[in-house]
Image: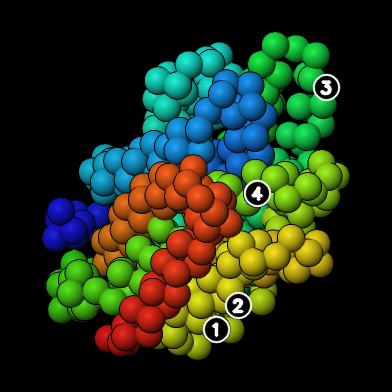
Amino acid sequence: MIGRHNALRPALTSPRPHVSSDTDGTPWLRLALALSLGAAVSLGITRFAYGLLLPPMRDDLGWSYTLAGAMNTFNAVGYLVGALLTPWLMRRASPGALLLWGSVLASVFMGLSGFFTTATPLLAQRLLAGVASAFVFIAGGLLAARLGALQPQRAGFLVGLYYGGTGLGIVVSALGVPLVLAAASGQPHGWAWAWWALAAVCLLATACMWWPARVLARMEAARPAASIATAAHNRVFRVRDFAFGLLGYAGFGVGYIGYMTFVIALLREQGSSPSAVTAFYALLGVAVLASSRIWAGLLDRHHNGQALARLNALLGLAVIVPALTAWWPLLLGSGLLFGAVFLSVVASTTALVRHNLPPAQWAAGISAFTIVFAAGQIVGPTVVGFIADGPGGLARGLVFSALALWVGAALALRQRAL
């Protein structure tokens, strides 16, 4: 499948992209911020807000941790399906159109999750939301890479800003979901109102993304056509060239999702108050927003797997802390470190592709990394949930997550620059 991604070339920048200056009047920062709403919708809300809703849904519906984890596993299965479909769709629609339509669909499926109480339709909604969120995340990543190509002197920052938009979705969820749950506490299945509120936020974000999608489409139309003859002499994406990076990223997919799925439930088990949980999750989201600035230099500097390896290793440290202690300052430090790192791991793979392949091959590279990311996320939640249902509970499940991240770091260290 990866070999067929060459058909995506017309949707991307030319092999020698025109570089725009800082003084041409283009609002680069505002474009990147508006585009980052795609990451806020696809991951910050569609994927991660479920961690806040898991405890009340589990209490209300009598779920095991295995079933609770399966909800995010199905979401990850949908994400994998969406990642596999995206190259085919990109040959028929622009990245901007896929970004917007995917965001509309993700919003709809989020809202539908509030209408069911049995496991089967809820699993189906999580799966379909995962498909749509993959469309949004990949299309937005391609547009962010295109934006970075126009501003190479700060490409790492602009690309990181897109992925850091996930933090905005986390902050909105952290502050909004508890308020909605409290307001609906007297209603049967009050958690449903939180799904509907999150769907409304996603629709609002979709409307805001119309502007960057339109501006970037206009920039692309005004640029000289790509030279296919020139591109044919450039390097093409081959899985074997990126094998260790792909394996390291799969370890990230397995490891990080267990934390994001279950850390709120673990904090509640350890006796943290609702206000403390809200503060923890909101500060984690703020740290995600800051991460684009923190790691921009690292992403620009390393053309091999060093950035991916270092960030994976730091993430493993953040993940294992709640498994070892319930001391609040260390738990808060865990959330801040996790937030400051985890979306920069995603940005590091886009940087790896951007450093080592011509623009016509970015779609192939980003899609391949997205596929292994999705495959890892399928494994993580169910395995952690299964471990949590046994002796040792959620703490032991997070040990598994940390080990997966450290194995991923060791593999990524072997990825060489091309």
Q: Position of residue 34 (x, y in %)?
A: 63, 50
Label 2 to label 4: alpha-carbon separation: 29 Å
Q: Nearer the viewer, residue 44 or 136?
A: 44
Depicted 261 relative to depicted 74: above or below: below
Task: Tell me the crowding category of disc 4: few under 14, some 14 to 19, or many 20 or more residues within 10 angstroms, Cα based.
Answer: many
Which circle, 3 or 4, is nearer the viewer? Answer: 4
Q: CA distance from mark 3 to mark 2?
A: 39 Å
Residue underneath mark 3: 183
Q: Residue at x 81, y 67 (%)?
A: 329
- Disc nearest the viewer among 2 and 4: 4
What's the amino acid at mark 3?
Ala
Dot 4 lies on which element? helix
Q: CA distance from mark 1 to mark 3?
A: 44 Å
Q: Quadrant of residue 4?
A: bottom left
Label 1 sits on residue: 298
Q: Residue at x 45, y 21 (%)?
A: 119
Circle 2: residue type: Trp
Q: Which residue is mark 2?
A: 295
Residue 386 occupies quadrant: top left
| Few, some or many residues within 10 Å of mark 1 (<14, 14–19, 20+) | some
Q: Amino acid at mark 4?
A: Leu
Look at the numbered disc 3 and give the secondary structure of its residue: helix
Mark toward the start of the polypeptide (3 vs 2): 3
